[in-house]
Image (cartoon, helix red, strand yellow):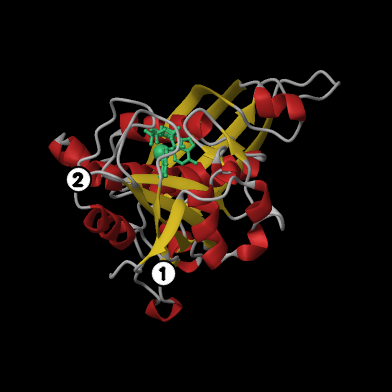
Amino acid sequence: MPDPADGDQEAVVTIDRIELAGIRAVGTIGLLPEERVRAQPFEIDLVIEVDVREAGRTDDLEYSVDYGVAIELATKVIENEPTLLLERVATRITEEVLGLARVEAVEVVVRKLRPPVPQDIASTGVRVRRTQADLRTRPRETTTAYVALGSNLGDRRDHLRHGVRSLPGVSAVSHLYETEPVGGPEQGAYLNLVVELATDLYPWELLDRCLAIEAGAGRERSVRWGARTLDLDVLLWGDARIESERLTVPHPRMWERRFVLAPLNDLAPQLLPEDWDRRLPAGGIARVDDLEL
Ligand code: A4P
Ligand code: MG
């Protein structure tokens, strides 16, 4: 900021912009029931504020922002995050693009090209501008999430320990249970537990983190419900209900599984239906020594 006391000295502020107009993407975004099931077209305009003086001088992309990456990030938000409001989508796009090196500020417009209103209207839209300072001064809220961990291959305790240690923001860990396999081919007994997280990750980011942690434990996917070194399932993320191609929350099979509900009951009994214990078939599960972390 120029200091008014510096009378004759003028601050030179360069705000260059990269402008990306009319990016099209299809997503499941809106409040109405039909908008929750049928994808519809959106258009995004992005203005990325970045100092391009050095890129202009050297002709080297290293000193600017690769707009292909920005387009990809914005499109992915529309395609993968089925939110209710355009405000939310626009905010998420600014967060993603501000994560790129050198970006100082981002302005985004998200337009719904076929808004569900009876009047004749070309589009509805939301325009949001955010700077790096906004990101720093407005930390993301944290949400309580629950992740179930299971292992029935190799050193099971070691795999689970890797899982719990790798998850960000773990605030509580359930007791540990040895459980008979449910579904799938003939396989060894599982060790199962559930962790509670205070997380600032969005559900899809949490899923990606879980998949990366599974990969780190040498997880191979050949048979559905087959034996695995480490399985991480996102059970709950706040009270969000998500049904997307990659992610369903609450986890669709959790309410029928004693190997999930028993450890979840250790941490958050208030989240379970009162009769869960009576409703599920008895047996197939034994508490064992807690996991040492
Ligand atoms: N996916 C969708 N929603 C979620 C979610 N909420 N959390 C997608 C995690 N992933 C979710 O998962 C396949 C895809 O599901 C992921 O890529 C993600 O995009 P996967 O882990 O590759 O496949 P899977 O685990 O073999 O299949 P599935 O249907 O997820 O199986 P489950 O439901 O995880 O059950 N018996 C005992 N005793 N203990 C166990 O832990 N686990 C299973 C696996 C079966 N039997 C078991 C146990
Ligand atoms: Mg799974």
Give the answer, above or below, for where 269 lies relative to 229: below
**Which residue lies at the image location 61% right of the left edge and 21% below the top edge?**
39
| Numbered label attached to residue 122 | none
Look at label 1 and name its amino acid. Answer: Met
Farthest residue, direction front: 283
Name the quarter where the C terminus is drawn: bottom left
**For mark 1, does the 10 Å Cα neighbourhood hold few (<14), some (14 to 19), or many (20 or more) residues?**
few
Do the numbered discs 2 and 1 sit on residues whose CB atoms are within 8 Å? no
Q: Quadrant of ligand 1?
A: top left
**Which residue lies at the image location 70% right of the left edge and 20% below the top edge?**
114
Q: Position of residue 232 (x, y in %)?
A: 38, 46
Q: Nearer the viewer, residue 207 or 83?
A: 207
Q: Nearer the viewer, residue 101 or 251?
A: 251
**Left or right: 86 as drawn, with respect to 206:** right
Which residue, given by chain and number where applicable, does mark 2 sit on? 54
Counting the numbered discs, the total is 2
How far is the residue under mark 2 from the one under mark 1? 22 Å
Q: Nearer the viewer, residue 292 or 283?
A: 283
For disc 2, does the CB lie below 8 Å from ligand 1? no
Give the answer, above or below, for where 151 lies relative to 43: below
Look at label 2 and name its amino acid. Answer: Glu
Which residue, given by chain and number where applicable, does mark 1 sit on? 1
